[in-house]
């Protein structure tokens, strides 16, 4: 019997324990590692090299989208299942473009969760509880978002994942920092910050930095407990 190694990434111990309890009801699945924040997730992934990673988006230190991109860059055969409370088609596309193979809500049924792990391990994709081929996924995204070939590198610039630097700048914007303050803290020029902000607004399809900050918070890209009142 082939063992599928699974890693859990979520900052809530009780939720991780619940995932472990569900996953280990399947004799083929073995939880080999757990991580509570983004930095630890990257370290543990390269250490344990899991087959499937259950990834939250709203993580301390580095959000799940960035973590997914970094892990997939070094471990392309690891399959990532984004499991989150932020459920909409735009978020699905962001997760998929970051490298995830599945996107499901945290209230997913236990049996469905186990099925999803097997789906992605077998080379399929999943949104919610629906198994899809790559071609079926492309059609689903086009129907939901109106973007043809949404997962192709030459597709619309909208919804392209933010680069690590752009995500870092967006986090500073969400905390209320000005371009000048961001430039000073990151050791880059004021113009470079402005260029990155232009790209961020375009990718997120928003008009200004306030809307970008709201987008980041509402989708769990920046943790509320890290933003000053």
Image (spheres, rainbow, N blue to C red):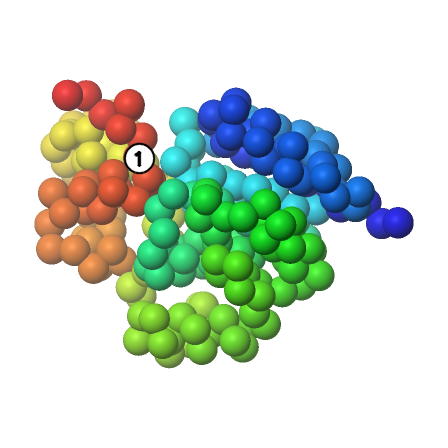
Q: Horizontal and vertical percent for residue 167?
A: 32, 41
Q: What residue is at 72 percent from the left and 32 percent from the top? A: 32
Secondary structure under the numbered disc 1 in the rendered image: loop
Q: Horizontal and vertical percent for residue 185?
A: 25, 25
> Around disc 1, counting alpha carbons within 10 Å, would you say few (fewer than 14), some (14 to 19), or many (20 or more)?
many
Seen from the viewer's position, the closer of residues 169 and 33 is: 33
Q: Horizontal and vertical percent for residue 213?
A: 19, 41
Residue 153 lies left or right of residue 147; in this view the side is right
Can residue 115 be seen in the rendering of this structure?
Answer: yes
Quarter of the figure with the C terminus = top left
Seen from the viewer's position, the closer of residues 77 and 81 is: 81
Residue 174 lies left or right of residue 31; in this view the side is left
Q: What residue is at 49 percent from the left and 71 percent from the top? A: 137
Residue 20 to residue 115: above or below: above
Seen from the viewer's position, the closer of residues 85 and 150 is: 85
Q: Horizontal and vertical percent for residue 74?
A: 62, 45
Can residue 195 be seen in the rendering of this structure?
Answer: no
Residue 98 lies left or right of residue 35; in this view the side is left
Q: What residue is at 85 percent from the left and 49 percent from the top? A: 2
The residue at which mark 1 appears reads as 222
| Residue occupying the far right of the picture | 1
Q: What residue is at 59 percent from the left and 49 percent from the top? A: 113
- Can you tell which quarter of the image residue 223 is in? top left
- Can you tell which quarter of the image residue 47 is in? top right
Residue 6 to residue 187: above or below: below
Residue 23 to residue 224: above or below: below
């Amino acid at each position: 019997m082939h063992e599928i190694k699974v890693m859990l990434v979520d900052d809530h111990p009780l939720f991780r324990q619940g995932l472990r309890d569900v996953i280990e009801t399947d004799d083929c699945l073995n939880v080999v590692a757990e991580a509570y924040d983004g930095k630890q997730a990257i370290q543990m992934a390269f250490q344990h090299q899991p087959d499937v990673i259950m990834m939250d988006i709203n993580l301390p230190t580095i959000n799940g989208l960035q973590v997914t991109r970094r892990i997939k860059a070094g471990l392309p055969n690891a399959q990532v299942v984004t499991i989150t409370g932020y459920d909409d088609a735009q978020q699905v596309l962001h997760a998929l473009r970051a490298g995830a193979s599945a996107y499901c809500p945290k209230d997913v049924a236990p049996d469905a969760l186990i099925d999803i792990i097997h789906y992605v391990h077998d080379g399929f994709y999943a949104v919610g509880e629906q198994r899809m081929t790559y071609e079926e996924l492309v059609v689903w995204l086009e129907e939901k978002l109106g973007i043809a070939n949404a997962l192709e590198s030459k597709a619309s610039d909208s919804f392209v994942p933010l680069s690590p630097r752009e995500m870092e700048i967006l986090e500073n914007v969400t905390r209320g920092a000005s371009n000048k303050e961001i430039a000073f803290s990151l050791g880059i020029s004021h113009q470079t910050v402005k260029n990155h902000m232009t790209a961020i607004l375009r990718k997120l399809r928003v008009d200004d930095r306030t809307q970008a900050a709201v987008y980041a918070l509402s989708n769990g890209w920046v943790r509320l407990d890290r933003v000053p009142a």
